Image (spheres, rainbow, N blue to C red):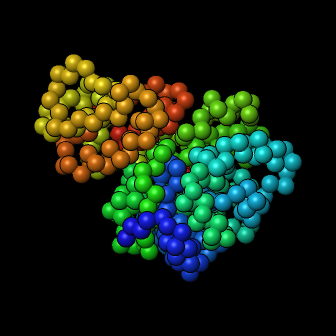
Amino acid sequence: MILPATDYNIEKAADLLRQAKLIAFPTETVYGLGANVFSPEAVAKIFEVKARPLFDPLIVHLADSKQLKDVANVDNEKLQQKVKALSVFWPGPLTLVLPANPSVPTLVRADLPSVAVRIPNHSVALKLIQSCGFPLAAPSANPFSYVSPTRAEHVEEHLGNYIEFTLDGGACQVGIESTILSLLDEAATILRPGAITLEMLRPILGEVSYQTSVSSNKPIAPGQLKTHYAPRTPMAFASDKSALFEKSRIGLISFQKPQGLTQKFEVLRCLSDRGDLQSIGQKLFDTIRELDKLGLDLILIDTCKEQDFGVAIMDRLRRACAKSSVGS
Ligand code: TXA
Ligand code: MG
């Protein structure tokens, strides 16, 4: 069931979350499947509903930085300074991996001594967490390893029967999951690229590097599986000529106005006139989901330059294409 995000429905959602039930809610990145972080019973339901392996830890969503101490241990002064400096990106699409406060159930953090936290930049999410009075453990509200949801309808399609309801916040603005930055070691590492980019983090932190395991099925950090975020239809990069194609029904997702097409496509979606990364990110998952429903033989997709937000877009697309036998 999808409900409009009125104050009344947000209160109702908070009540249900207090009773260890699950509510899906919008954030600026993707929709989250929320549970009371301090209720192992509620958190267990997330793993069940998503068919998510227990080794894949959850992100904890806070209403403000005052809640940070309830879930993380930031007594270390150096760490505290880093978190303070990075809070210019909060609320926003930046998740920090920090030493955990032992009060966070081990199920949330997959037995790790660390916890991932962020403050989402969405008024509905913030109101909901405030009204609960406790942080929400929330993964993306999709079945494990399918494309993340960027509209309430996406959540309902797969999870509607298993949760109380989805608060409707329309289409997510960013459209790609948050940047995950580990502050556990001296040098900060990006475990998952997102809208807060390496280029934005470097001036604040100095040394920052990527530590994503795109090419492997053995995650460095849990959840970094090679074939995450994949549609059911085989997907390949349009630049990969080997994917062309005796296939008869092909859909194309382009990042700018296509010119001089030689192939006939069953369906063509253009995410931006001139390759604007924000527009591409915002529409990407929605469009992949749309084409995935059409029973195509193949979805072809553009590539973009791997800098700034383009790193996150290509990270997700590589994983989505890795699943299909075509072109890999
Ligand atoms: O934008 C987002 O981050 C969305 C919205 C709902 O906030 N959430 C999201 O959650 O993408 P999820 O569960 O799909 O991805 C969470 C990932 C895990 O797969 C794992 O890679 C990482 O966060 N993670 C969580 N806790 C961690 C920890 N303690 N150490 C390392 N990685 C962790
Ligand atoms: Mg996810």
Q: Residue furthest right?
A: 77
Question: Which one is nearer the viewer's eye here, 216 or 260?
Answer: 260
Q: Is residue 76 visible?
A: yes
Q: Give how far across and how far down residue 93 sits, in percent.
A: 58, 46
Q: Give how far across and how far down residue 103 sits, in percent.
A: 73, 69
Quarter location, residue 266: top left
Q: Give how far across and how far down residue 37 sits, in percent.
A: 62, 68
Q: Give how far across and how far down residue 33 sits, in percent.
A: 49, 63
Picture residue at 54% right of the left edge, 40% below the top:
194
Question: Which one is nearer the viewer's eye here, 134 or 54?
Answer: 134
Judge left or right: residue 117 versus residue 30. Answer: right
Picture residue at 87% right of the left edge, 48% below the top:
77
In this rendering, the answer to whether 169 lies above or below 46 is above
The count of marks equals: 0
In this rendering, the answer to whether 130 lies above or below 296 is below
Question: Which one is nearer the viewer's eye here, 57 or 153?
Answer: 153
